[in-house]
Amino acid sequence: MTPTGKLQTVSAAPIALRGTALPALPARQGMWVGAQMLVAGFVSVVGLWAMQPELALSIAIGAGAGSVNPKKMWALPIVTVAVALAGLLFTVNQLPAVVGAGAVAGALATWLLPHRTDWLDHVNGALATLTGSSLGLWAATALLPNSMPLVISAIVTAGLVGLMGSQGLLPAAIRFDNGPDLPSPRQIQAELQLRYRPPVFRALELYEKACQHAPDRDTRGGLAEVAMWVYRLQLTRQTLDAEAESIDPVSINDRIDRYENPDPEEDEFTRERHAATAAHLKRLLEHRALIDVEIRRNDALVEYALAFLEEARAGLAVARELPGETMPERLDEVLGRLRSHAKEGDTRRKTAREVGAF
């Protein structure tokens, strides 16, 4: 609610979705590298790097991968432990620990990204991170002199490994930049109550069906903006309903009547305060009326957006190339052969009937 008494709701214009992944990618990679170097310095100071360098590096890789999303720092210990166990498992089986640690780190770092990812993103992240981490470790081993102090060597090694391994975020970031970041069913269920979900699921269904015939990325992006708009409108509707339910017009009118008809024995100060209270309550009812108007407008926008998606789905289905638009190249040849066979068969049967007559 603004000071002028107008409710602020979702704009009638669909929001822009693309172009938000790549600018954040360098920051996430920087957090990965910084956390990995910090943890590497710590484990080297406590002596773990000198005793178990592969395990220490795995712990550092896990800490770096777990820090890519500041809003999900609760996952940092989980990712660190999982990556360390993967590195330890590979070490026990006499395999390079950096390979197992890098694969698990890439998959989990992709999972921590704020936009929706799927199994392909996790696979790409795992492959990119294990490759990058392995190359970073090879570069550190080849370039760093043996005379370098252990703590500095550990930090620089972790920095090179993290710099290369953090490239595992790139495939998912590029894929997100080329596609929409629509809410997942889990996100919808977490943020919307049951009665507000059907329009959103309907919008996503229409989007998926329309995209089957969408000719280009820009068209799919525009459809995604409308679907995301429906989601935001339902979030607004949920908020408006909560505000409306908190204001009971019946009880407020009863209070207004009570304050506007004071007890004759009340003093002047009390009567003035009651009159001021009644004035505030009247303005509250005005706000309640504005909320009802915004709810109706919100519902109208949702219906408009769904109708747009339905029209887009049907329009794209008609606009695509249909089988009836072009004739098979060999249709004339095939039809000619069929007619020839039909004539031959008719001639053969006619001849057989004439011979049988004799």
Image (cartoon, grey):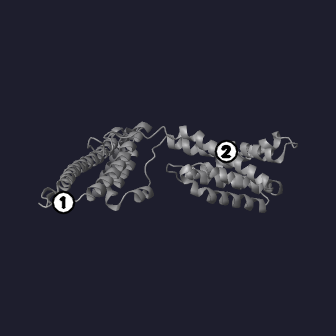
Residue at screen point 52% across, 41% down: 21
Label 2 is placed on what type of residue? Answer: Gly
Q: Is residue 358 visible?
A: no
Q: Is residue 18 left or right of residue 286?
A: right
Q: Percent position (x, y) of residue 330?
A: 41, 39
Q: Within 10 Å of the Cα at label 2, are there few (<14), some (14-19), or many (20+) other Cα atoms?
A: many
Label 1 is placed on what type of residue? Answer: Arg
Residue annotated with mark 1 = 255
The one nearer the camera, 278 or 342, is: 278
Residue annotated with mark 2 = 34
| Disc with the residue nearer the chain's start (1 vs 2) | 2
In the rendered image, the vertical position of residue 90 relative to residue 214, given as above or below:
below
Circle 1 or circle 2, nearest the eye: 1
Residue at screen point 82% across, 41% down: 142
In the rendered image, the vertical position of residue 195 relative to residue 296, given as above or below:
below
Residue 149, image quadrant: top right
Disc 1 vs disc 2: Cβ atoms closer than 8 Å? no
Report helix, strand or loop for mark 2: helix
C-alpha distance separating marks 1 and 2: 60 Å
Residue at screen point 74% across, 50% down: 40
